[in-house]
């Protein structure tokens, strides 16, 4: 059993997304067999990559105010307590639309 | 893409754990291919089952003050921001050790 605070895991910059960091709080290094939990932080004015990929995202918004952009370019506002399921191959991007850090959990299968 | 608030999903009582509810916020009903995200709430004085099973848990504590009990009966205090990885077959239980609701995310593979 591993018990830690999420801030015990270093926040790594995301090369393709300035202003975005990621913490791999549970993953292969912990011998997690199927999927990884990450905590992602997006600075005001920044966003994650607007893209698609074969694996899904299961997301829970922890703090801040953001928007999720879909394949059509439509945006839906999210805040603490919002849940987002991004199916495989769905175009998506997470945008900070507030003045504080947008922080969310994002779980993905091992890839 | 599914975007909702976690409270949009009904909280179901957990038969074997009085004072505990579960919301399946992302799961098979959403065509999630590999794993399910649940939000679990434990009332003051209550706890989840103290047990073990073949699948893992990836947990993030959202609110409240709790304790995680391991196979030896040792307890570790957790609070908002704590991360818990319960490997397959590890004995575990989540206990509310505060005076407010203990709320956490718990992700499991489809079983």
Image (cartoon, coloured by chain):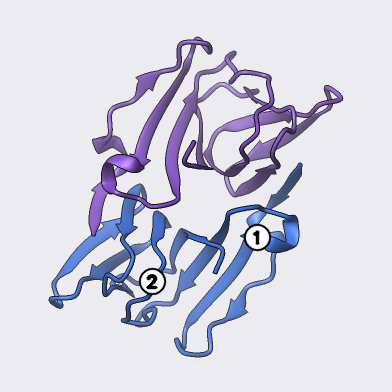
Chain colours: A blue, B purple
Label 1 and label 2: CA atoms lie apart by: 19 Å
Q: Position of residue A89 (x, y in %)?
A: 30, 71
Which residue is depicted at the point 71% across and 28% down? B92
Closest to the observer, B16 or A88: A88
Q: Is residue A68 above or below residue B93?
A: below
Q: In front of the other: label 1 or label 2?
A: 2
Q: Are marks 1 and 2 in contact (CB under 8 Å)?
A: no
Closest to the observer, B36 or B5: B36
The disc label shown at residue A27, or none: 1
Which residue is depicted at the point 66% across and 44% down? B84
Closest to the observer, B104 or B29: B29
Which residue is depicted at the point 58% across and 20% down? B48
Which residue is depicted at the point 62% across and 78% down? A12
Q: Residues within 10 Å of mark 2 (few under 14, many from 20)?
A: few
Q: Is residue A94 above or below residue B57?
A: below
Q: Position of residue A18 (x, y in %)?
A: 46, 88
Left or right: B15 in relation to B91: left
Q: Reading the chain from its start, which is encountered first: label 1 or label 2?
A: 1
Left or right: A71 in relation to B59: left
Circle 2 sits in a helix, a strand or a loop, which is it?
Answer: loop
Using the rendered view, name the quadrant where residue B65 is placed: top right
The disc label shown at residue B26, or none: none
Q: Is residue A95 above or below residue A87?
A: below
Q: Is residue B49 above or below residue A8?
A: above
Which residue in the structure is indicated by mark 2? A54
Identify the image quadrant of the N terminus of chain B. bottom left
Q: Position of residue A65 (x, y in %)?
A: 31, 63
Circle 2 chain:
A
Using the rendered view, name the quadrant where residue A56 is placed: bottom left
| Residue furthest to the right | B72
């Amino acid at each position: 059993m591993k018990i830690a605070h999420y801030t015990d895991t270093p926040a790594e910059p995301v090369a393709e997304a300035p202003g975005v960091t990621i913490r791999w709080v549970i993953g292969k290094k912990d011998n997690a067999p199927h999927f990884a939990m990450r905590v992602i932080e997006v600075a005001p004015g920044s966003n994650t990559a607007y893209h698609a990929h074969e694996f899904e995202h299961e997301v829970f918004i922890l703090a801040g105010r953001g928007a999720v952009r879909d394949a059509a370019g439509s945006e839906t506002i999210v805040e603490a307590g919002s849940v987002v399921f991004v199916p495989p191959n769905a175009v998506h991007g997470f945008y900070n639309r507030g003045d504080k850090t947008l922080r969310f959990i994002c779980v993905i299968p091992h890839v």
